[in-house]
Amino acid sequence: MKKHIAKYYPLVPVFAAYLVMFLIGRNMSGMWQLMGMLAFYCALGQAFNIFLGMTGYVDFGYVAFLGVGTYGMAIGITRFASFEGLGIGIIAIGFLLALAMATLLSLAVGAVALRLRGAYFAIATIGVNEGFRYLIEGARIWNGSEGIIFMADMNQAFGREMASALSTFWADVMVFIIAALAAVVTIYYMRSKIGYALTAIREDEDAAKVMGINVTKYKIIAFITSASFAGLVGASSWAIKTPYVFPPEVFEIHYTIEAIIIVLLGGAGTLLGPVVGGLIYGLSKYWLAVILPGFQLLIFAPLIIIIIVAFPEGVIGLLKARVNGTKYKIIIE
Amino acid sequence: MALLKIDNVTKRFGGLVAVDRVSMEIDEGELIGIVGPNGSGKTTLFNVISGVYIPEEGTVTFEGKDITRVPSYKRAPMGLGRTFQISRPFSSASVRENVAIGAMFGTLAHTVSVDNALKIADRYIDLVGLSAYRDKAAGTLTPVEKKLMEIARALAMRPKLLLMDEAMAGMNPKDIDDMVTFIKKIRKEEKIAIVSMVEHIMRAVAGLAERVMVMNQGTKLIDAKTEEALTNPRVIEIYLGHTQDQSKWRSEIWKEEKDTNG
């Protein structure tokens, strides 16, 4: 039994990091917003890591899942705001819709694109977010390019005070919870057959097949899991926080790029990596926005090249190699 | 009934006929060598058997079931294990995890838990003598160690038939002899049929296989007892060039070398 629990020790530093962030945000004035942003990047990294980190496949259209998650919450709130007595249950409905929509979209994209390999997969996914954006705008689905503005619906459903608390405080708390959940799912996958199958696929897909691994099945599992977490992140840190959705904003490719940077920086396929990557990226972005506004991407582009060339394992990958054989091995994953 | 039956298999790549109407049978527990120069279609034939390629013509039957169109990941659990010409370890994973992956997914039941798979892995790691490297990343092993790890990984799948693709390529004579002894040992202990593919190390084939199939330019040249196959004039010609006198002379040398090898 003890051994069984020991498998999950690597969650300790992850949860500790989230707890510290939460406490700083709560107790130091003016820090809550920054901590909320950091939690968003950690959650995004953690969600993307389940696919990018564990399978080694790069999905350039990843932001599409974030986007449909945002729409899920927006639709949930606007459609159900007038129902009396649902109260906070509306948020739950929104999350369910976000989850369902992200899952369905990922199933559709994955079933087609995951039959492609490596770079071909990456190329095939580039268009997904743009395509989805133009579909919404062109076909005027979900209000088309006008987007959905639902501040009034939130006020109607929860009352002004609660609505404001939801978007300034509870939205970020939900992001923390989603990030923690993603960490739990990640370690569960790592310790189960799914993790072993994904490792084999990442290292050598043909050899994995000959070893009896149904590669398409496991890739789709990772893809859907990763996408549904992205949907949840979009629903909370985006929709509830800023109660409006515009297609050009939520299908913006640079969130995909940010997610890639976070995962690679921290260490692809590690548990703690996305947290560390999210913190480093979030903090430096925040700092650069102050000293060199608008230059973040210009600085991060060469940075990502340096990471890939100099330390492809990322921060936690390096750390893992260091602690291998020491007593710290058990908590670093 | 033969364990594996290949019937008139043809595999083309565009205009190139890589395997041309090849038939062969393998019985349970047999140890067969497939020999042939570079480009003779050996690896393609292996890939057809393990399901990487689907042949244009002909059938592959395993234990009486037609598996010609069965995807490779479903063939492994039926009892078809293989190693690769150039080792293909899952580099970042440890030796133990590599072998455990074989035990987890390559067995018929598909019910082997992670913990059990790791236990099974330990047994096969001990069998191939890599116990000291259990927790090392597979990518850091030497080429010979990688080959051994691949064998352990394939054995952990509990195959009925093990396909070994150039298990001895690039090894020095001592390692080759050790490997030959080892392959004979696992075949006896695990009671499995083994098909070993060898490009040109006759020392290995002569000492290893009971039966040899020689391939040339995609076709089966001969399928016979090892001695008969390796002394066949056509085989000698393919490997060593022609002229009657020379090949006679060379066949003497073959015999001599074989005798010294036991």
Image: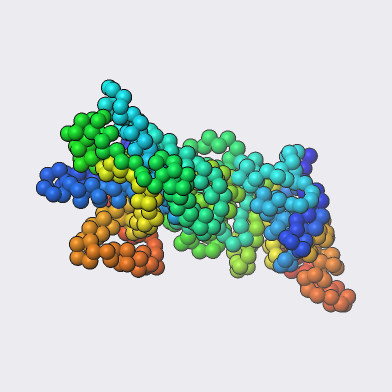
Q: Residue at x 68, y 53 (%)?
A: B53
Q: Is residue A301 left or right of residue A35?
A: right
State the residue lying farthest toward the right. Answer: B244
Q: In the rendering, at what x and y percent does residue A280 appear?
A: 26, 57
| Nearest to the observer: residue B175 or residue A17 | A17
| Nearest to the observer: residue A87 or residue A212 | A87
Q: In the rendering, at what x and y percent does residue A140 appear?
A: 44, 43
| Nearest to the observer: residue A139 or residue A183 | A139
Q: Which residue is drawn at 74% across and 41% down?
A: B66
**Quadrant where the image shows the N terminus of chain A:** top left
Q: In this view, does A137 lie to the left or right of A280?
A: right
Q: Which residue is drawn at 51% across and 46% down?
A: A109
Q: In this view, does A303 lie above or below A83?
A: below
Q: How is the image coloured?
A: rainbow
Total marks placed: 0
Q: Is residue B87 above or below residue B31?
A: below
Judge whether residue A196 can be spotted in this image. Answer: no
Q: Which residue is drawn at 51% across and 58% down?
A: A123
| Nearest to the observer: residue B111 or residue A49 | A49
State the residue lying farthest toward the top. Answer: A85
Judge whether residue A292 can be spotted in this image. Answer: yes
Q: In the rendering, at what x and y percent does residue A199 appear?
A: 47, 50
| Residue A161, quarter of picture | top left
| Residue A320, quarter of picture | bottom left
Q: In the rendering, at what x and y percent does residue B162 appear?
A: 65, 49
